[in-house]
Image (cartoon, rainbow, N blue to C red):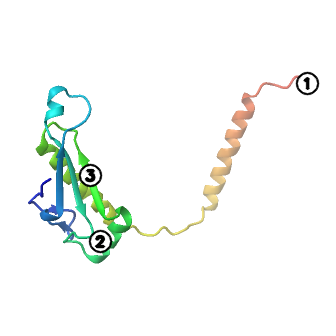
Amino acid sequence: MSEPTEDLVVDGRVRIRGHDLVERFTTSGGPGGQHANRSQTRVELSVDLRTCSGLRDADRARLLSRFGDRVVVVAGEERSQTRNRQLARRRLAALLRNALAVRRPRRATRPTAASQTRRLEAKRRRSQQKRDRRRPADGD
């Protein structure tokens, strides 16, 4: 395990210090021949949200409720450890950015009269189309 030295910039206001990030390198699973079983190119990047500096209390609470104490991302698609490292950092930043985004609460609205009419007319047309496909009754 190693600690990256570079800070991870999540967005304009959140920056995770390099010493708070933990990288672990392992061998990638799956096919790949001799190279895959020997090279430790798969990267697990994690951050402990409880002890992480660079988070405001409100952001920390939001992330803890969403993910728990620890966030872990994995990248092992590339053959290069450096490239997988970049992918893992990008994924972690995107994951945290998404979780920190404050979404506006949805306001309940009523469907308009025109939209209700369109919906019911479409249902009638579909019903008629299905009725037209039926086999004719013997008595007709």
Q: What residue type is labelled 2?
A: Arg
Q: Residues within 10 Å of mark 1 (few under 14, many from 20)?
A: few
Q: What residue type is labelled 1?
A: Gly
Q: Which of 136 and 50 is in front in this view?
A: 50
Indicate left or right for 66 with 48 as reference: right
Q: How crowded is mark 2: few (under 14 residues within 10 Å), some or many (20 or more)?
A: some
Q: How crowded is mark 3: few (under 14 residues within 10 Å), some or many (20 or more)?
A: some
Q: Which residue appears at 46% of the width and 69% of the height?
A: 105
Q: Quadrant of residue 101?
A: bottom left
The numbered mark, 3 or 2, whose residue comes first in the sequence reads 2
Q: In which quarter of the image is residue 57?
A: bottom left
The numbered mark, 3 or 1, whose residue comes first in the sequence reads 3
| Residue beneath disc 2 | 60
Figure check: 29 above or below 67: above
Q: What element carries label 2?
A: helix
Single out the mark in the foreground, 1 or 2: 2
Figure check: 136 above or below 4: above
Task: Tell which residue pokes out farthest to the right in this image.
Answer: 139
Real-space Cα separation, disc 3 to disc 1, in angstroms: 68 Å
Q: Is mark 3 on a helix, strand or loop?
A: strand
Figure check: 39 above or below 8: above
Task: Determine which of the numbered discs, if any, sits on residue 139 in the image.
Answer: 1
Real-space Cα separation, disc 3 to disc 2, in angstroms: 18 Å
